[in-house]
Image: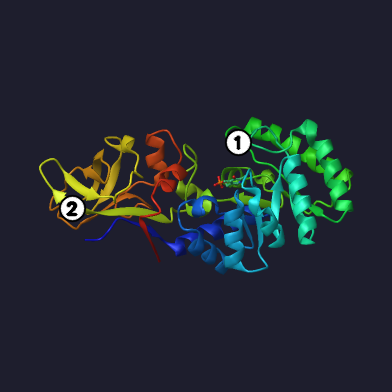
Amino acid sequence: MSAPTLRIDLAVFADNIRTVRARVAPAELLLVVKDDAYGHGLDRIVMAAVQEQVSWFGSSDLETALAVRFLVGASPRILAWPAGGLARLRNAVAESIDLGVGDLALLDSAAAAAKECGVTARVHLKIDTGLRRNGFRPEQWGDALGRARGYEDAGLIEVVAVWSHIAEASDDEDDAARALFDDAVDAARQAGCAIELRHLAASAASFARPEFTYDLVRVGAFCFGIRSADGPSEQSLGIRPIASFEGAVTQVSTEGVTVALGSFDGVPSTLGARVEVGTPGGRRALLRVDEETMLVEAWPGAAVGDTVVLFGPGGAGEDSATTLAESIGTIGEEILLRVSPLVSRAYR
Ligand SMILES: *Cc1c(COP(=O)(O)O)cnc(C)c1O
């Protein structure tokens, strides 16, 4: 009996990377690999990206950034934008991790870590252009630049980039954010920072709004084939999901077909009676999700051991993770990230 498995197609991942790069050129791709590469498994994803000559990686946390450095060696650039967990800041600075910095405390810590390590820390200063997730507020920007310039003069940091994160929800809001962003870049240059890079866009804006791509785009979702909920189709974007989640039939009864999902609660039970799944007999209703199993509408000839696909690229008639997510008002990442690390990942 085959155990539930998240199957990951690295060739499709490589295709998605090529599609994203062609779309955003001449801007470069920074592949975002936070949350264990969106649940796909950090190591294999990073190594596959290196084969595609991806030269920038990024994660919110320092642990992931350090793990990527271990995998890729010295030359690729790695950006971390830590909100906490600063215990590893010295390691990160010593390992040439670029730091996304959006508050004075982190700026001070970065400079202190650089001093201890005897190196110059590469800093990407973050301006808050409205998302309020973090970043210097526009009214703090002058102070931030002043303090950063002081650390530059002391040889402790080098401000290599200005960046921000936008909502990608409404064009008007994003345009307003972009105007604030451009002002922040101008101010940084006037203050004497040699800004090499500007980066603003994640997946959605990097495809939909060419003027948002600047020098670098930070893309996770689209490289994994996860489209935006209520956004353009995979087909129109030219990407495909790289992961499919499948389980085996353990029982066929008058009630329906029982499929083992493993002993975890990774599949939202709210999907029950809302979506269809892929079976050897085509699309069938997902009747109910229990703790370790799901119950699926029967198909002719259903047998113990048959494979049922909950989400994936569509080969067995299944929907994408994002389509499932839309039926319960969330995003595709949420579905992927809930697949337990205990479920085996199989790569090809
Ligand atoms: C997660 C994240 C991204 C990537 O967003 P996608 O929509 O997955 O491409 C980019 N920038 C920041 C700051 C993020 O946290």
Q: Is residue 31 left or right of residue 116?
A: left
Residue 28 sits above or below residue 319 on the image: below
Q: According to the image, label 1 marks what residue?
A: 167
In x, y percent, where is residue 271? 32, 37
| 142 relative to 261 in the view: left or right | right
Name the mark nearer the viewer: 1 or 2: 2
Q: How many marks?
A: 2
Residue at the spot of label 2: 250
Q: Is residue 98 above or below residue 203?
A: below
Point 50% across, 63% down: residue: 43
- Residue type for callout 1: Ala
In the structure shown, which secondary structural element does the residue marked by tag 1 occupy? loop
Measured Cα–Cα span from mark 1 to mark 2: 43 Å
Tell which of 183 and 99 is nearer to you: 99
Where in the figure is residue 228, as x and y percent of width and height?
50, 42
Image coordinates for residue 210, horizontal then vertical, percent: 65, 46
- Mark linked to residue 27: none
118 or 317, nearer to the observer: 118
Dot 2 falls on a residue whose secondary structure is strand
Between 15 and 321, the residue placed more toward the observer is: 321
Question: Does the closest atom of ligand 1 sit within 8 Å of the Cβ of label 2?
Answer: no
Please provide percent x and percent y for residue 255.
13, 40
